Amino acid sequence: MLDTAVALDLLQRGDLEIEGRLIDASNTTVRAVIAVDGVTARCVYKPIRGERPLWDFPDGTLAGRERAAFIVAEATGWDLVPPTILRDGPLGHGAVQLWLDDEDQEEPPLGFVPARKVPVGWHVIASARDDSGRAYRLAHADDPRLARLAIFDAIINNADRKGGHILATVDGRVRGVDHGVSFHADPKLRTILWGWTGDPLPEEAGEMLAKLGADLAGELGARLAEHLTVTELAALSARVEDLRTTNLFPTPSQDWPAIPWPPV
């Protein structure tokens, strides 16, 4: 994966050449080749005009939320989201994110596994059966990389953390993608990473949350104000403070589906 500074420059200045549409995406999402000054990579391009209206998010704001998620991820220092910018492209203004090629990826430690073959130490999130009646478990590893992502999702109020939105790479990192339905002012956390529900946060989270809360009162908050409303920013700060004060992983809400569909 490219260095973040190099990747951001490439995404901002590079020429976009569309390769094709990702047909499984609910909004218009295309893969493109981007190149500048001899540097070439693939990217995901999500034009604002291709966003489907949602009942609970303002129209035309999903791309900005993708950018906001990257900004917050950078502020955590945990390298959780691929470089993401907003820019004009062949289909208009939208979010452009560095693509992680298949050869750079490995299977993340999560998913549906046969009920009798859940790896030792994994957290079971839900039970299911296939068409033949065989029992499966939705589960994920007790992995500090996933725990970081779970904390990040609680911060940004991610309403759609599916297994397919979690990418593990051969360099040992785990990153999240598809954050367009995040940062709502109302509680909407929906994720498959519930394995630590109610457990104390890892020690590293305390320092990060304290710094993040302070940064939100300054330059970080000003940068996010380009993409989020005053109410959403206030809710973001409140979530950070609540996590720092309780020092616990969140618990599922009784007023909102806890697991996205499909989960993976």
Image (spheres, rainbow, N blue to C red):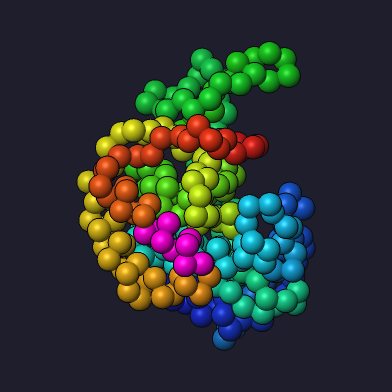
Q: Which residues are magenta?
A: 229-237
Residue 229: where, in percent of width, then height?
51, 67
Q: Indicate whether residue 232 is drawn in magenta.
A: yes
Residue 40 vs residue 160, the one in the foreground: 160
Magenta region includes residue 258: no
User: Is residue 42 shown to the viewer in this render?
Assistant: no
Q: Is residue 42 left or right of residue 20?
A: left
Question: Left or right of 151: which side holds 165?
Answer: right
Residue 256 shown left or right of residue 55 in the figure: left
The spot of residue 174 in percent (x, y) is 45, 50
Q: Residue 220, relative to residue 29: is it above or below? A: below
Asked if 257 appears above or below 243 in the picture, the reply is above
Residue 197 versus residue 20 in the image, above or below: above
Q: Residue at point 37% right, 34% down?
A: 196
Query: Which residue in the rendered view is the most extreme toward the front?
Result: 231
Image: 122 above or below 189: above
- Secondary structure mostly taken by the magenta-highlighted segment of the chain: helix
* Residue 183 visible at all: yes
- Image coordinates of residue 130 in percent, x first then y, are 68, 20
Q: Nearer the viewer, residue 97 or 6?
A: 97
Number of numbered markers: 0
Q: Residue at x 59, y 39 (%)?
A: 260
Question: Which quadrant of the figure has residue 12?
Answer: bottom right
Say which quadrant the C terminus sits in: top right
Seen from the viewer's position, the closer of residues 131 and 200 is 200
Q: Residue furthest bottom?
A: 37
User: Does 120 sit left or right of 139 as displayed?
Assistant: left
On the image, the x and y values in percent for residue 170 come to: 46, 51
Question: Which of 165/246 is in front?
Answer: 246
Q: Which residue sits at x=48%, y=22%?
A: 118
Asked where in the image residue 79 lies, by quadrant, the reply is: bottom left
| Picture residue at 36% right of the left edge, 55% below the top | 238
